[in-house]
Amino acid sequence: MQRSFTRRGFAAALATILSIATLSAARADIADYEFRLVQADVKQGDGAVVAVRLVDKRSGKAVPDAVIFATRIDMAPEGMPTMTAPVEALQPTEPGVYRFKTNLMMAGGWQLSLAAKVQGETGTLENKLVLRAVP
């Protein structure tokens, strides 16, 4: 009789520990992801290509298949947030790297703003990345 209570207690404790571990692993958050510039300096001019990598901050691994639904590039770092340029998404060349074609008409600081949905996560990832257009 004593053994069955001990086994049941052990089994209950093990089940509790496993369920807590499973819930902790499942608690990914949209804040666990971020976009990072592949290169901070980009050649100035029409047809400039800006590449960003979507990274899971917990593992450092690139995250493919995000749905980027909002993009904007402007000169906010230079005090000119109303100076914008068109942004066109390009086909990816490697998983987790997203490329955009734009017209960096002036040298200086530019801010790329992105909004995306990450597969399997709730919420929207929003990042503002500062790059430099160089002649």
Image (cartoon, rainbow, N blue to C red):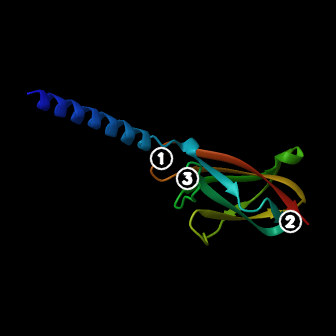
Q: Earlier in the sequence, mark 1 or mark 3?
A: 3
Q: Earlier in the sequence, mark 2 or mark 1?
A: 2
- What residue do we see at 32% from left, 40% from top? 18
**Horizontal and vertical percent position of residue 109:** 86, 53
Q: Is residue 32 visible?
A: yes
Q: Residue furthest left?
A: 1
Location of mark 2 (residue): 44
Estimate the spatial distance between the alpha carbons at disc 1 and disc 3, rounded to whole Å.
Answer: 16 Å
- What residue do we see at 82% from left, 68% from top? 46
- What residue do we see at 54% from left, 56% from top? 67
- Image quadrant of residue 105? bottom right
Q: Label 1's element?
A: loop
- What residue do we see at 89% from left, 59% from top? 106
Estimate the spatial distance between the alpha carbons at disc 2 and disc 3, rounded to whole Å.
Answer: 33 Å
Question: Number of marks in the image?
Answer: 3
Q: Which amino acid, mark 1?
A: Glu
Location of mark 3 (residue): 59
